[in-house]
Image (cartoon, rainbow, N blue to C red):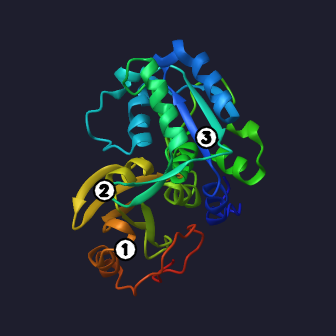
Amino acid sequence: MDDSESCRFCEIGSQIGSKPYAIFISWHNARPYWRKISSRLQKRFEVLAESEWAWSPDMFDRNLKRLYGMDLDRTFNKAAEVGNGPFLVSVVYDDSPNYSSVDNEQMPKLVNKNVVDLKKTMRSWMGGGFLVHSSADAQEFMYDAFLIFDDQFITWAVTTDQTELQARSHRFQLTAGEVGWKSMRHLTSCLHFSQDARALQILSPTSEQTQTVLHVCSQNPKATLAALNASSKAPVDYGWEFQVRVGDRTYTGRVLNNTPRGSTDDKCVSSCLANFNLSRTTNGLHDGTNPPRGNPVG
């Protein structure tokens, strides 16, 4: 994704988020059931794309943590359960969704019960466990699809070319940001599609300021750190400081705690502003393209 490309993430989010798409991932240890899973998906939904996917065994555990929004430093044994071999990725469209409001610890969301119930049915075929994953709502679909397909997801969202939702080779596929972000626009696209994050501040590097500093408010800071594939994490007031690779440089950022149900915590905002003596920013993401030095960008 080139910095000069206008991806219009807000428009993409509005367009894709308003439609009943879902993604199913049938992990390697569910392989004996792949044919049955595929057949049931075709009977219940319109299957837009389905292909076998593979991640490097060395990166599999970290990719799982990013997909599930887990602490990247935590011991996580899910790879042993689901298997780190090839897995089946299916993208579907539900022409008769059945939405239900679910109130989690952070904020209520509308989930498609057709998708969630079918996932539970598939898991029951295998005696329980978590060998099948699915998105539950629109935001989770966008995050999962972006993480797995990366630029191909953006191209599909813009062109509706369903071949973009297929694996392009039988070699190991890279997740978005797995080996670093191509540009600040690439990184902020991840923030836009992640489930809880909202960027408050991006400052361009200048001759006087050698690092871009990214500030993010999130209702789930560790999940945001996982989405960003952040490293060198350290606790700070109200959140975490981290490092992230963008292009050929390493940048510093902070993920700060946000209050539940979408209202920004004054401490989160104040901590951001105090670092740069800035005025309060407006909501929303900035694509990182030449923001004025020292001014807030919304």
**Tag 3: Cα neighbours inside 10 Å, few (<14), some, or many (≥20)?**
many
Name of the residue lying farthest toward the top: 32
Q: Label 3 is placed on what type of residue?
A: Phe
Residue 250 visible (yes or no):
no
Q: Give the labeled residue for mark 3.
A: 149
Q: Residue at x 31, y 77 (%)?
A: 275
**Tag 1: Cα neighbours inside 10 Å, few (<14), some, or many (≥20)?**
few
Front residue of 206/187: it is 187
Residue 178 visible (yes or no):
yes
Q: Give the labeled residue for mark 2.
A: 105
Q: Label 1 is placed on what type of residue?
A: Ser
Q: Give the labeled residue for mark 1.
A: 263
Q: CA distance from mark 1 to mark 3?
A: 31 Å
- The spot of residue 199 in percent (x, y) is 45, 68
Q: CA distance from mark 3 to mark 2?
A: 29 Å
Indicate whether 39 appears above or below 295. Answer: above
